[in-house]
Amino acid sequence: MSGTHPDAAGGPFRHPALFYRGRAEYLAGTVPFVAEGVAAGEPVAVAVPAWRLGPLRDAVAGRLGSGARRVHWVDMTRAGRNPGRIIPGVLRAFADRHPGRRVRIVGEPIWPSRSEAEYPACAQHEALINPAFAGRAVSILCPYDASGLDRRVLDEAARTHPVLIDAAGTRASDRYAPETVVAAHNVPLPAPPESAGRMPFDLGSLEASRAFAARCAAGAGMPERRVMSVELAVSELTANSVRHGGGAGVLAVWDDGAHVIVEVRDGGHLADPLAGRRPVPPDEPGGRGLLLVNRLADLVRVHTGAGGTTVRAYFAR
């Protein structure tokens, strides 16, 4: 696993996946990637789960000495808890701070304890990194725990990454097709439970829908700060439905024991798969609704098609 990590497709953007088994392979695949970036004078960030940060930081310090202080460290279990905020809030946030320079990032968004509800958003995130950074001088190495993750996760990683790295070496992925992964997880979400509170809304009832969601969240025992987050997310989602989704929709709110979940269904079609996952320039009006929802929620799932759009946001209790 040593050596230079190659350009993924002959262009400036590089997006290899690292399949590792155990700590030794993890460090053998990530530490040289970080060290090469520091040696080349590139800004380097490492965004991995909390339990990986300590060993990786120690190994980088052991190799680079004081040069390790140039590495930016991020706990992905916090910053990337919602996969929908990783591109704008972690990857682009770091890359955009260094315009005109090649940037190098280790980003590990998928780990074995990710839930079944979270995984589709994770897989779509990995696929959407490619169009989000196309043409930019950015290298993003994505480690995958090959001994702890399900085979389907590794199979989809081969479709979202043009280059694969493991103990046997480096090779081009002959299954690379990220758009198929986005489509595969764009499936109808199951109906809310019978116990969910429901409220149709239109332009004249936006304020009432926000108040309805706030009452449901407060009734589930959420603290005031989180109730405000639910209310703000519902405000953005329902306003988007009125503006872009046919002028009306249906709001549902329920408690699954671990989360308060809000869902907005409307008749619109969300044509841009990167909506809510890319930063919006300060001088561009609008376009921040889903971006804000991704920032507020612990998970956002979306299904969109000719028959309408459903956005479901999870708020951990």
Image (cartoon, helix red, strand yellow):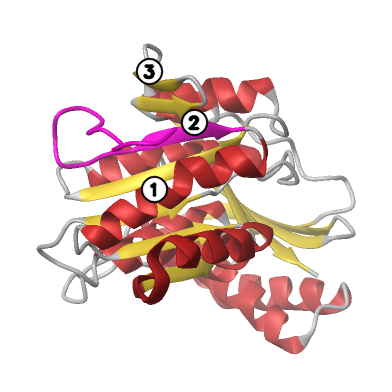
- Residues at marks 1 and 3, CA–CA distance in whole angstroms: 21 Å
Which residue in the protein does label 3 denote? 173
Amino acid tagged 3: Ser
Neighbourhood count class around disc 2 (C-alpha, 10 Å): few under 14, some 14–19, many 20 upward: few
Report x, y in % for residue 167: 52, 25
Q: Quadrant of the N terminus?
A: top left
Viewer-nearest of discs 2 and 1: 1
- Please tell me how crowded label 1 is: few (under 14), some (14-19), or many (20+) other residues with Cα within 10 Å: some
**Residue 243 in view in this figure:** yes
Q: Under tag 1, what secondary structure?
A: helix
- Point out the stretch of residues depicted in magenta: 1-20
Q: Residue at x 45, y 51 (%)?
A: 31
Q: Is residue 103 left or right of residue 117?
A: left
Circle 2: residue type: Gly
Outermost residue to the left: 100
Mark carried by residue 32 = 1
Which mark lies nearer to you, 3 or 2? 3
